[in-house]
Image (cartoon, grey):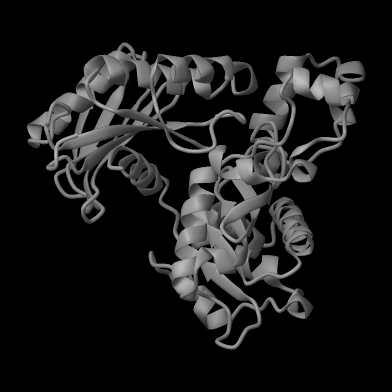
Amino acid sequence: MTSQATRVLVLNSGSSSVKYQLLDMRDGTRLAVGLVERIGESASRLVHTPSGDGAGRRERTGRIADHERALEAVAEELALDGMGIDSPELAAIGHRVVHGGLEFSAPTVIDDAVLAEIERLVPVAPLHNPANITGIRTARALRPDLPQVAVFDTAFHTTMPEHAARYAIDVATADAHRIRRYGFHGTSHAYVSRRAAELLGRAPEELNLIVLHLGNGASASAVAGGRCVDTSMGLTPLEGLVMGTRSGDIDPAVVFHLERVAGMDTDEIDELLNKKSGLTGLCGDNDMREIRRRVDAGDAAATLAFDIYIHRLKKYIGAYYAVLGRVDAVVFTAGVGENAAPVREAAIAGLGELGLVVDAELNAVRSGEPRLVSPENARVAVAVVPTDEEMEIARQTFALVDA
């Protein structure tokens, strides 16, 4: 890497999409952001903005056949702004990889052996890792000379002790098939934990935090001294909190019941629990703004869905309070956590005996900055910290290649 190379391109490759950001790590400036969606369809679309403030937005439509062509199109857009993938200022490409198993607990420079190991993890992440692998292969072909770094969603959670990570099933079966709690949203939990410590003016090593990543997907983590000691998602992102379309925690026997009584096969049950459950299954909406509008209008289905969502959230706050023993802050993040004041208020309501209180006036403030929403002298801080997974991927990538 040359001394002038301070930029990192972050790629998040999905099955039919590529999200990307180009960042300058000298000051964290976003030089470009974009999205390629509906890859492989006739109505493919690329939206590119050559700055972090939304100015100069460009869009192109028309069939983009595959991920290789998608990344070539991204490279073309970046080149139009003088920031091409062949630029000597580009230090590395950072890839979001959803599942790293137990093999990867830190950002890792990708070589053939690493890529083979990521492929070996496909059975435990069949919906995510194949797309991540496609993005890696394509980027390596475009810039074989450039460091490519994998940053794993699961990595932050590899510090969980065995008593938190293990399921109570036959050990030999679990080990043979890699069945354990892995956790997800790790880059978000890592970033938010560190930023929460900055907000509180303390070192991460001094703090016990409960971090609530609440978006369409949702997860909670118990973080002690900057290390994850428990998290709500498990072998897959299905376990834990009620989500937009996922059920979260459910009696495993429901699966057997649906198979025996309803005649549903494995794929149908998978579709039900992952795509037709959660808030969508309960009330037909997965947008918390719309659900709250319906609640305020007296809609019974939306009210029940909201109450179920909050009940599960409150249970996890209490459980992780017990796991940690002492809590310095509860931190809300992601789309719902950052923007839905009624969710934060309801989740904390009634927890005053635990030192948890929300100040209504502070909670109502809308801001893109980290902030406290608890009273000044609260025993336990309640905070809102906007997440930035792309920045975390870029930070980890650059720290590795700049070392």
Q: Quadrant of the C terminus?
A: top left
Height in image: 11 above or below 3?
A: above
> Can residue 85 be seen in the rendering of this structure?
yes
Place residue 140 in its image quadrant.
top left
From the viewer's perspective, is 335 left or right of 72? right
Name the residue rendered at 88%, 25% in the picture: 170
| Residue 194 x, y percent position in the rendering | 47, 60
> Can residue 385 be seen in the rendering of this structure?
no
Q: What residue occupies the far bottom of the structure in this picture? A: 377
Height in image: 143 above or below 344?
A: above
From the viewer's perspective, is 320 left or right of 133? right
Place residue 324 in its image quadrant.
bottom right
Give whichever of 323, 35 is nearer the camera.
323
| Residue 239 x, y percent position in the rendering | 72, 38
Give whichever of 304, 343 is nearer the camera.
343
Give whichever of 325, 233 is nearer the camera.
325
Name the residue rendered at 62%, 63% in the picture: 209
Name the residue rendered at 53%, 25% in the picture: 128
Q: Quadrant of the N terminus?
A: top left
Place residue 137 in its image quadrant.
top left
| Residue 150 x, y percent position in the rendering | 42, 31
